[in-house]
Amino acid sequence: MDNFRLPAPRGHKRTPVSIDVTVNGILNFVDGRITDLSEGGARVDGASMPARSRCEIHYGGEVTYAVVMWSEVDRMGVRFPYELTHGALYNALDRARGAALVDPAQVFLNTRPATFGRRGLS
């Protein structure tokens, strides 16, 4: 029998975001963009560091510590050793989740003019 195991289910819901950050490795600062965020970790595009290395994510004047779990040439996945519960990055996550709950039709209804067509030109 093969020793193949399915990955454990994630403990947090991932949310698509677009957050520009600076990632600090041991020797350098790299600009990147978080494109997927949860309380437990993030996907950072445009930055790459070796797997299992530690880094800092700088956003909104604050630092969030992370460990690189996987890495490719132009992106990486990081896990936060301390779950996000407050701060600038958590607030950005909370805003993104709130925006995802808005019905697109409601956005249209709220932004259209009060009159439509020639009926409003009297």
Image (cartoon, rainbow, N blue to C red):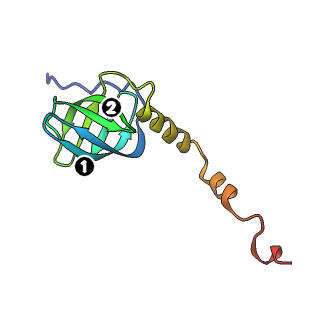
Q: List x then y, in percent, for residue 12.
A: 41, 28
Which residue is identified by label 2? 63
116 sits left or right of 30 in the view:
right
Name the outermost residue toward the right. 122
Which quadrant would residue 67 be assigned to in this image? top left
Q: Amino acid at mark 2?
A: Val
Quick check: 75 above or below 6?
below
17 sits left or right of 1 in the view:
right
Which residue shows up at 53% across the image and 43% down it?
A: 100
- Local packing at callout 2 (Cα closer than 10 Å; few below 14, some 14-19, many 20+) is some
Which quadrant would residue 14 be assigned to in this image? top left
- Local packing at callout 1 (Cα closer than 10 Å; few below 14, some 14-19, many 20+) is some
Quadrant where the C terminus sits is bottom right
> Which is nearer the eye, 6 or 53?
53
Quick check: 121 above or below 6?
below
Which residue is identified by label 1? 46
